[in-house]
Image: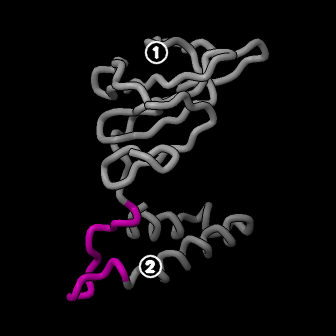
Amino acid sequence: MPLNDFQCLIKDPMINKCIQCKPYVAQVARFFLRDISFTLNSAGKLKQEMFFIPRLPRSLIVCIGGVESDGPDEPIEIQEPTGPRVYHQCVSLGKYVYLMGGTGGFNPTNTCCRFHTETMKYEEVSPMHEIRCFLSAVELNGKALRNGRI
């Protein structure tokens, strides 16, 4: 949230008079005050608010995988090429969401695919070298890192 938006929010009578909101407003205000020195340029004006850059695309929520009582949940609209999976990992890189590992039932997999957020389609990519279930993954400097490997 940009600082100007936060200032407008705390001036809103509904927020300003709400006793339950005060601890949350104070916590965000402390965050702004603590980090404001890192976001000021030499002229004392705010640089691009690096802590509050909006996520892109703004209008997309991707829910992948899930569990029902009898196993992995089927996707509602867009079929994943390898079928339903659980205990996998997803990483967002640019306009793609990469899916790695997991299981479609009882057998863990090494498959990987990516979901293109503009075309709304999946495509398979090179598999992992090892079968992985319950893995960890993160984006680091524009690359997907899983369990310590690129």
| Amino acid of disc 2 | Asp
Label 2 vs label 1: CA separation? 41 Å
Q: Which mark is residue 98?
A: none
Q: Is residue 63 visible from the viewing direction of this image?
A: no
Span colored in magenta:
38-52
Q: Which of the two marks, 2 or 1, is nearer to us in this view?
A: 1
SS majority, magenta: loop
Q: Secondary structure at mark 2?
A: helix
> Residue 35, which numbered label?
2
Amino acid bearing label 1: Glu
Task: Farthest residue to the front: give it.
Answer: 129
The residue where tag 1 is placed is: 80
Q: Position of residue 125 (x, y in %)?
A: 34, 24
Mark 2 touches mark 1? (CB < 8 Å): no
- Is residue 100 rendered to the left or right of residue 42? right
Q: Residue at the spot x=46%, y=66% of the render? A: 6
Quarter that holds the C terminus: top left
Question: Going by the image, does 44 lie left or right of 66?
Answer: left
- Residue 13, located in which quarter of the rendered image? bottom right
Look at the picture and state if 140 lies above or below 116.
below
Name which quarter of the figure residue 56 lies in. Answer: top left
Residue 35, relative to residue 53: is it above or below?
below
Front residue (pair 89, 74): 89
